[in-house]
Image (cartoon, helix red, strand yellow):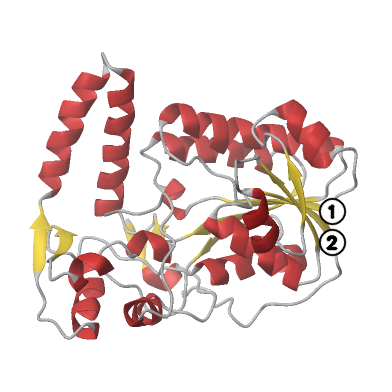
Amino acid sequence: MHATDFSALTTAGPSLRVLLLGATGTIGLATAQALIQRGHDVVCFVRPRPGATALEATALKGATIRYGDPTDAVSLKQDGFAAGRFDAVVSCMASRTGSPRDAWRVDHQAHVHALEAAQAAGVQHFVLLSAICVQKPLLTFQHAKLAFEKVLLESGMTYSIVRPTAFFKSLSGQLDRVKKGKPFLIFGDGNLTACKPISDNDLADFIAGCLDDKSRHNQILPIGGPGPAITPRQQGEYLFQLLGQAPRFKSVPVGFLDGIIAVLGLMGQFIPRVADKAELARIGRYYATESMLVWDASANRYAAELTPSHGKQTLFEAYALWASGQAAPDRGEHAVF
């Protein structure tokens, strides 16, 4: 059994009125642009930020921008939906820190408010950007995402739950290290994990396509980018080759992370802000030891061949652009290093 290749399945449907949440994040901005390019009437509901109005007006050109608090039930109803008619809600909203409190506030409760407001407004379709890592939940933010997924599944509304693999931006942080002659950091031998990373634009195209493609309705949709799965060691080897350098790796033992987690976890019992740092360390360990691929429970392994692909740009093509100075990665809050 092999995964579906969605790359050739993009279709254009009728123009819909869409409320987009999380439009100021890198995936959200790309999704807004993808929706606009498909001819949809897009309303972006965002939190007001000092000095951001002009930037948002440029980046979200073609969309209507409404300001308020997307995590507040009253603001969602009054400022976001504003008694208007919408065909769909697309949410790229996610916790920025991954801390337990923020995860339950944003990944779960804010989405519950959004779903309730959508139902009251007669919305027919809810497209949710989730994460592939929720298939093996060990972290608070994963449980928060799954809790809302369950609410959405049981709501009776048409849904599309998109679970992407690794983002390019989360794998871009070591480019500058290698350029400066520093070794590429790996955990273990660099082959503990693998992923099929997907670019912002390719993921945005897939998310926007969920509105038009009925085969993606009422589905949980894991999705990766084009090409084979790659390991951290392969990423490093490509960067060294690209920059004409001899490969140099520095291995970080997973046990080192375990020690940090143990110390921070103990201190976090008495100091709340340290508890958040312990959770961030657990998140780092998870990504150091778990592949971002579909989990095949029957075979008890991650399966690249079961992980669907979509899009055109590979991570190595992006590396080549970044190394040449033609573009720069927007790492946001997703950087590992």
Q: Which mark is residue 16?
A: 2
Name the element at disc 1.
Answer: loop
Mark 1 or mark 2: name the one nearer the start of the chain.
2
Residue 120 in the image, given as x and y percentages of width and height: 85, 35
Task: Identify the mark at residue 87; answer none if there is no mark.
Answer: 1
- The percent position of residue 117, horizontal first and vertical second, equals 79, 35
SS at mark 2 in the image: loop
Q: Which residue is at the front of the view, 8 or 301?
A: 8
* Residue at horizontal 25 percent and vertical 67 percent from the top: 176
Q: Nearer the viewer, residue 204 or 62?
A: 62
Three-letter code for the amino acid on which mark 1 is drawn: Asp
Give how far apart the Cα atoms at labels 1 and 2 are. 6 Å
In this image, 167 relative to 176: left or right? right
Q: Is residue 242 above or below residue 292?
A: below
How busy is the neighbourhood of tag 1: few (under 14 within 10 Å), some, or many (20 plus)?
A: some
Identify the disc placed on residue 213: none
C-beta proximity under 8 Å, tags 1 and 2: yes
| Other residues around mark 2 within 10 Å, as few (<14) / some (14–19) / many (≥20) | some
The kind of residue tagged 2 is Leu
Q: Seen from this angle, which residue lies furthest top?
A: 270
At x 77%, y 59%, the residue is 63
In the figure, 335 relative to 329: above or below?
Answer: above
